[in-house]
Amino acid sequence: MLNGCSLTVLILGVLSSLGMVIFQINSLAVDYPLNIFTDSSVQLNWSGILSTIEVGVGSAVLLLCTVTAVPYLGVIDIKNRAPIKFATIYYAIMALTSVIISIYRLSETGIIFDNGICKRLEGDLVCPTVMFRSEMTIEKNEDCIFNAFADSSSVWNKAGDPKIDWSDREMYDKKSQQTVFDAYKAARPDVDIDMDEMTLYHDCWYWGCDEICNDRHRINIVMAYASVGVSVVYIVLSILSGVQSEFDYKEVPPVDTPDEPETRFLVELPSIPPGTDQGSSSDNNGSVSSESIKSWNFNLRM
């Protein structure tokens, strides 16, 4: 007879974790590499870093559900709950990690909250396309060419001013910082900053903050919802594992073992038959004669 709880944990755990691992590895290795810019030490791909973490979490869940669910598939009366309790704790840790990643992705892509990189209009980093869409529309690639550094939106498309093609990923690279800085100075001539102080916009590209201008927009949305999906599954796994740790468990009462019998050795002194001269049974120095010793009876009592 199959253990339904173990079977459910195995199916849910293998399908969700294996699917996430394959999805993220394929994305990082084939379609959306982790590092595409010239200086990855200062241009971190946080979306990709979260994907690598999810690969690790998915691999751990895959291993955990296989090791702790398979041995109990045919066991209904579980005696040893220690491995299942161990699995429950780690399922909860994996679920919490996945929930944090999900919230991070949902926030940065702008699906929830307004302080994510793809939604906010103020702060240290405001993506040019996000700023532009606050006043204008982007319907085709040609609309991605503008200069939104000026305070007034009326001059963002002013003819003759330097403009940036924000559909070109090279413009998000540190090597193009001079080009972006020149456009910034043309829009704000009164602002006195150096090129090294110019904001880097690589995060806007990695998070795909515009569905027209950035080719990573759709994959980030898919990743966000995929993270939410596996988070729900990991939470279910932790609940099922917690239930299974008490599943049809019968406490075996301790067996009372009787005390070891006490072994006693009793030596009975020989009795002197009536009418026997006590003096004849001993020599002059008071020692017992050999004949008297032979008449002793030794009884062993258990």
Image (cartoon, rainbow, N blue to C red):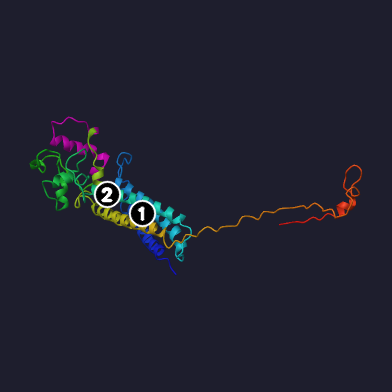
Q: Residues within 10 Å of mark 2 (few under 14, many from 20)?
A: some
View extreme (top): residue: 192
Query: In the rendering, at what x and y percent does residue 292 appear?
Result: 87, 52
Quarter of the picture holding the C terminus: bottom right
Q: Nearer the viewer, mark 2 or mark 1?
A: 2
Kindly identify the residue that appears in the image at 11 percent across and 42 percent down: 156
Please state which of residues 292 and 103 is positioned toward the viewer in this rendering: 292
Magenta span contains residue 276: no
Quarter of the picture holding the N terminus: bottom left
Three-letter code, disc 2: Ile
Query: In the rendering, at what x and y percent does residue 47 appear?
Result: 29, 48
Residue 230 in the image: above or below residue 201: below
Which segment did they paint magenta?
169-196
Residue labelled with disc 1: 25
Disc 2 + disc 1, Cβ < 8 Å: no
Three-letter code, disc 1: Ile
Please state which of residues 251 and 209 is positioned toward the viewer in this rendering: 251
User: For residue 191, which quarter of the picture?
Assistant: top left
Magenta span contains residue 195: yes
Whether residue 203 is visible here, answered yes or no, is: yes
Q: Residues within 10 Å of mark 1 (few under 14, many from 20)?
A: some
Residue labelled with disc 2: 103
Kindly identify the residue that appears in the image at 17 percent across and 38 percent down: 183
| Left-right relation of 302 to 285 | left
* Element type where label 2 sits in the image: helix
* Element type where label 1 sits in the image: helix
